[in-house]
Structures are given as structure tokens and as C-alpha cells.
Image (cartoon, rainbow, N blue to C red):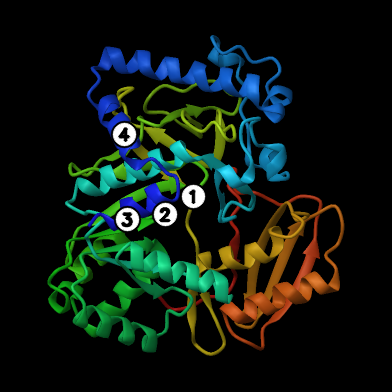
Amino acid sequence: MNLFNFVLKLNGFPIKKAKQLLKSVQLKSEIDFKAYVETKKQDIVSYHLKHNTFYKRFAKEADPSDWRSVPVMTKSDLQQPLESLLSDAFTKRQVYIGKTSGSSGHPFLFSKDKFCHAMTWAIIQDRFGWFNIDFNSSKQARFYGIPQDSAGYYKEQLKDVISNRTRFNVFDLSAEAFELWLAVFKSKKLEYLNGYTSAMVQFAKYLQQKDRVLKSLCPSLKICIATSEMLFEDDKALMERYFGIPVINEYGASELDLIAFENPKGQWQVNSETLFVEVLDDHGNTLPYGEEGRLVITSLYNKAQPFIRYDIGDIGRLSKQSTLKSPILEDLTGRTNDIVHLPSGKKAAGLTFYYVTKSIIEKDGSVKEFVIEQLELDRFKVIYVSPEALSEDKKNRIIREMETYLEKGLHIKFERQDHLVRSKSGKLKQFRSYIKQNP
């Protein structure tokens, strides 16, 4: 039984229709594909200019037939109550709602209409299918975190059952945890690994120390898919050596879609079916293939909320071998997260702070930007941008959240600033560690 697709359908996401449309787009010739993209670009701008109050104000000078007149939007433009971003035909009950991780320092809620979200899953299933992975049957080893509150925890557990997933919790990257993970791999016929790059690299390093190869313990493994963080070549080589399987590089954004996925030829193929990806210079000019600039992305199907010429906050370059139908992402700058080291010796993935982010943004959204610095093993500093200082109650709530996900006895200082300093690439790194540890 195709349980995964059945649950999507049950929740109002028309996955069958999405897959049919995706296939029809993929079958288009280069000439027809160009016409398709131009039509979809104009259609999505026209739709939001007509039906979205926020976009009418934001893009009041935009002409759907003149792409250069369409303004670039940033994450900070979307940091406002979700209701003010929804198009006329949609309510919060009629859309898929998600949260960005805040890895760029700009966390916010977003929405997708149900067909758009179905297209997201159609793309993901299509790409995983390149490597004979079927979401309805293949068993996944999932290297992610999990909410610690009861409702969130059991919701993720249910999703894991539906999706054939065994979860390996990246909040604990200790040797003891890794040994428990190895016992699971010995006992289950898992087919692929999927999750945060930094956590899986730490697991590979542990296997290296023990001189073990994961596939020898779990022969059913086929591939590893690394996501959410930068995958460096030396880390990839390490993972392939000690996992004993190919490592596939994925690049996506929850508010958009799967952006690029490594194809069987080893190329980072951009999703051109549901997204239009541009590379712009600092003045907003489109750069030719081969030149590095800001990645600006348009979601061609999201009618619930506009993501049109959306600056995702990353710097990249499309290969000179790219075509409109088959763009190849050659370089990506950013998306790397450090490992958190704690007094007990415990380690955790930098994206652990995604879950801390929730405690900051879900209530009133007053914190616009933030970074977390680790100054010593037990000392952290939260630097944030907000119209007013955090109340003691909010600070205590954040401290409790950190101690829940990490460990007790941490000293956390808060510092409010007018703005945060960015890297040369324009990226804001959410977590920075100033302590030195042996690799």
C-alpha cells in the first residue's frame, strides 16, 4: 500500500495530480520549456498583484511582462504576521504552514497552498527515485532532531511511522549515543540515510575511530542524502568511506522547495520544474552562467503566499554548462553549522538551535534576528535584534529550552543590538563557537 501518498491525499495534498503535471513539464522540449517558464513567471506575478494585499503594496511598480520591474524580496520583508501575507482566497486552515529554521538569523512562518505543497513532494519523490528510493516503501535512517514537548514529539513519531523512518536524534552526538545507533543499524534493514550533514559527519568520524563501515553492519543500505548544511568534499569522502555508500548532496529551503539535488552524474541539478532560480549581483542585475552572486528564487506555484524573486541569503554560481531546463549549481556559499560542545562531553548539531528558535518566534515574533555564540563550554550568548528588550520571563523560557535540548548548568547571557554583523557573503550564521576542540 502506498501509505505515504495516501496520507498526503487524505490531508488534501493532490499528489497524483502533482506527479502528472511534473511529468508533463519534464517531457517538454527546450523551446516549449522556455515558453512554460515565461508563462508561469508572468502568471504568478499577475496572480499575487491581483489577489495578495501584501504583494500589491510591495510590488506596486511591477509589470508581469517585464521581469526586471519585479522587485527582489528578502526574508525580513516576510517577517510579519502570516495572516497579512496570505492571498485573498486562503485562510490558515486551507494552507500548509511551516517555519524556517532561522539558520540565516531570519526565522519566520510561511504558507503554501495545498497543490504547491503537493508539487514539493512530487519533486522530492522524483529526485529520490533517481537512486531507487521509494517514499512508500524504502526505510529511512533519519538524522534530525525531534521536539521535546509531548504534542510535537508524538506528531513526529507518527510521521516517522507513516514515512518508514527510524529517527536518530542529533541532540546527542556522544559515543554512547553512537553505539546505540549502531545497534539499530545491526537490527534493521534500513535503505538510506537522510539528515543534517554535521551530525552525520560526526557519526562517520566515530566509525573512523572504531574502524567500522556502516554498510558491513547494515548491508541493505544504498545511499546517504546530506541536507540543511554545507557538505564539504573531505567530509563527503569520509562519509562515503565509513558509511560504505554514495553520499548525495541536497540543497533546499522549507519555504520554497527542493532547490538542487545531486544527480547520478554527480551534478547538482537545480529544480527548474517548480522554481525559477536567478543569480544576481549586488545591484540586482542578472549574472550569466559561471559568475557568482546572490541566489534569488521564484516559486512558480505558490498562490497562498508570494515567494517571487526571493533572496534566500545564499551566494552561488550556476555552471556554464547550464540550460534553462537543466541548470547546474556549481558553487554554494554558506549553510555550514558548527558542532556544540558541552561541559559533560556531550556534542550536538548546530541546528539544535532551530528548536530554540521556536520558543522565540512562535508567540509574538518580536525578535527579528539573532545569533548564538558559544564563548566557553558552559557559556553562551544570545545576540538579538528586537524593538524592545526581552522580558525576564522570555529569557527564562529560552534558558529552559536550551537546557531541555542540551543540558542543565549552562550560563546564558542576552545582548540586544540594533543590527547584526554579517559575513562577506551577506550570510548571517546563527551559531558561532569560539572554543577550540580537537576534531
**Residue drawn at (63%, 68%) of the image:** 356
| Circle 2 or circle 3, nearest the eye | 3
Is residue 351 rendered to the left or right of residue 26? right
Q: Which of marks 1 and 3 is nearer the N terminus?
A: 3
Q: Residue 64: which numbered mark, if any?
A: none
Q: Residues within 10 Å of mark 2 (few under 14, many from 20)?
A: many
Which one is in front, 368 or 234? Answer: 368
Amino acid carrying mark 2 in the image: Met
Q: How far apart are marks 2 and 3 (CA)?
A: 29 Å
**Front position among marks 1 and 3:** 3
| Residue 244 x, y percent position in the rendering | 17, 67
Q: Residue at x 71, y 72 (%)?
A: 398
Front residue (pair 236, 8): 8
What's the residue type where badge 1 is placed? Gly
Q: Which of marks 3 and 4 is nearer the N terminus?
A: 3
Q: Distance between the residues labelled 2 and 4?
A: 17 Å
> Mark 3 highlights which residue?
4
Residue that mark 2 sits on: 230
**Viewed as shown, does residue 270 lie left or right of 296?**
left
| Location of mark 1 (residue) | 334
